[in-house]
C-alpha cells in the first residue's frame, strides 16, 4: 500500500472529549481508512467543557465531515445540534455528529447498542436494573433499560443529576413498567446486591479516574455491563463472581480482557447496522468472540477522495470497514 498523504481534499473526522489521550479510536479509524484507501483522517480532539460550543462551531466551520463525542460532552453536544434523531432526542445526548450545511445533526448509537446487548444477555421485562451514573452515557443506559426492563434504579454521586435523568427519561419507559427511580448514593452497595442487572455508566475505570465503584459486589447470575472498554476492575470482579455479560457469557473472567460492551456485532439490516456501533471509543485489539459473524473480504477501493455523504464514522463491528481495521491494526502491532 502506498504511503498516505494528507492534502487539501482529505476528509476530516474526529473524536471530541476531555480527555481523549487514552482513546484507541484514531488507531482503529485511520487503519480502516488506510486499508480501504480512503482519503480521510481521524483525529483525537481534546476539548475542554467550557469551550464545547466554541469547539463544535469551529470544527463545523473548518469542514469536519463528522465527529464522535465522548465523556463529558454528550449532553452538551445534543443541545448544540440543529437536528437530532429520534433516539438522541429521547435520550438527551448525542455521540455521533454529522455535518450538515446549517450545523450538526446528532445521533445516539450508544442507546440502541445497549438495548441490543441487554437483550442478548437475557434481560426481560420486570428485571431489577441498577444504573450507576447520570451523565450522557448513563442516559443511554437508562433509555435501554426502560425500553426493555421497564424500569431502572439510578444512583449517582450528585443526587440532583440522577433526579433530572429520571424525569427526562420517564417517557421512554415501556407501558406498565416501574420507570426510572433515583436512589441515594449511600444505598449503592445494597442496591447492587439486590439488582438483576448492574450498568456502569460512570467514568470509573477510565485512565486517570477511580478504578472501583465503592461497595459494589457481584454474584452469579447477575448481568454486568461496563460502558468503559478494556480490562476494568468492574469486569474482572464481575467475571470472577460469575456474573454474565452480553451473549450470556462471563462478564469478564480473570486473564481475559472483556470486549467493550458497545463493540459488538450488529443485527443485519437494522438501523444499528447502518449507523455507528457506538460513540464511545472502541478497542480494535480486543479478540473476536467465537460467535462473531464472518463477513466477505472487502474489495479494494481505488482512488477515492473523501467519504460518501452517508458513510458513518464509527462503523459497526460486522462491517468490512471494521474487519479491515482489525486486520490493519493487528498487522501494525505485529
Image: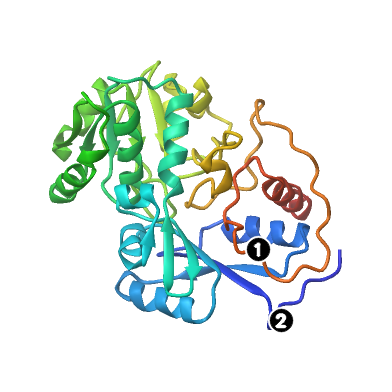
Residue 273 vertical position relative to residue 58 in the rendered view, above or below: above
Secondary-structure class at tag 2: loop
Answer with mark 1 or mark 2, whichever residue precedes in sequence: 2
Asked if residue 320 lies left or right of residue 276, the reply is: right
User: Quick one: label 1, few (<14), some, or many (20+) residues within 10 Å?
Assistant: few
Residue 101 vertical position relative to residue 166 in the rendered view, above or below: below
Q: Quadrant of the N terminus?
A: bottom right
Q: Residue at x 48, y 70 (%)?
A: 100
Residue 118 appears at what percent x and percent y? 42, 29
**Farthest right residue?**
1
Residue 258 appears at what percent x and percent y? 54, 35
Mark linked to residue 308: 1
**Picture quadrant of residue 33:** bottom right
Specify how the rendered protein is coloured: rainbow
Asked if the residues shown at circle 1 and circle 2 are in contact, with their CB atoms under 8 angstroms apart, the answer is no
Residue 25 appears at what percent x and percent y? 57, 57
Mark linked to residue 138: none
Asked if residue 101 lies left or right of residue 333, the reply is: left
Which residue is denoted by mark 2 in the rendering? 7
Q: Residue at x 44, y 40 (%)?
A: 112
Residue 202 vertical position relative to residue 313 in the rendered view, above or below: above
Secondary-structure class at tag 1: loop
Q: CA distance from mark 1 to mark 2?
A: 18 Å
Frontmost of labels 1 and 2 is 1
**Farthest top residue?**
221
Amino acid at each position: 500500500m502506498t504511503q498516505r498523504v494528507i492534502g487539501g481534499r482529505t476528509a476530516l473526522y474526529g473524536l471530541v472529549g476531555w480527555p481523549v489521550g487514552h482513546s484507541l479510536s484514531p488507531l482503529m479509524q485511520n487503519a480502516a481508512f488506510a486499508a480501504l484507501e480512503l482519503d480521510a483522517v481521524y483525529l483525537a480532539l481534546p476539548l475542554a467543557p467550557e469551550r464545547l460550543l466554541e469547539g463544535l462551531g469551529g470544527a463545523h466551520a473548518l469542514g469536519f465531515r463528522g465527529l464522535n463525542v465522548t465523556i463529558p460532552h454528550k449532553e452538551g453536544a445534543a443541545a448544540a445540534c440543529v437536528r437530532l434523531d429520534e433516539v438522541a432526542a429521547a435520550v438527551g445526548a448525542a455521540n455521533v455528529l454529522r455535518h450538515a450545511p446549517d450545523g450538526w445533526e446528532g445521533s445516539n448509537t450508544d442507546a440502541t447498542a445497549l438495548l441490543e446487548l441487554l437483550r442478548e444477555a437475557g434481560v426481560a421485562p420486570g428485571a431489577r436494573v441498577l444504573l450507576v451514573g447520570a451523565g450522557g452515557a448513563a442516559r443511554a443506559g437508562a433509555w435501554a433499560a426502560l425500553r426493555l426492563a421497564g424500569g431502572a434504579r439510578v444512583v449517582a454521586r450528585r443526587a440532583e443529576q440522577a433526579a433530572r435523568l429520571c424525569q427526562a427519561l420517564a417517557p421512554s419507559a415501556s407501558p406498565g413498567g416501574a420507570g426510572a427511580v433515583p436512589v441515594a448514593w449511600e444505598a449503592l452497595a445494597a442496591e447492587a446486591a439486590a439488582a438483576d442487572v448492574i450498568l456502569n455508566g460512570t467514568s470509573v475505570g477510565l485512565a486517570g479516574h477511580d478504578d472501583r465503584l465503592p461497595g459494589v459486589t457481584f454474584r452469579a447470575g447477575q448481568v454486568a455491563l461496563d460502558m468503559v472498554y478494556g480490562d476494568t476492575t468492574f469486569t474482572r470482579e464481575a467475571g470472577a463472581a460469575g456474573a454474565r455479560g452480553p451473549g450470556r457469557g462471563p462478564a469478564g473472567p480473570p486473564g481475559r480482557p472483556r470486549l467493550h460492551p458497545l463493540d459488538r456485532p450488529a443485527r443485519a439490516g437494522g438501523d444499528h447496522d447502518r449507523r455507528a456501533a457506538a460513540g464511545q471509543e472502541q478497542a480494535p485489539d480486543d479478540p473476536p468472540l467465537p460467535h462473531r459473524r464472518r463477513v466477505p473480504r472487502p474489495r479494494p477501493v481505488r482512488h477515492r477522495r473523501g467519504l460518501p455523504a452517508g458513510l458513518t464514522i464509527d462503523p459497526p463491528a460486522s462491517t468490512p470497514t471494521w474487519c479491515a481495521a482489525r486486520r490493519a491494526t493487528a498487522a501494525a502491532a505485529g
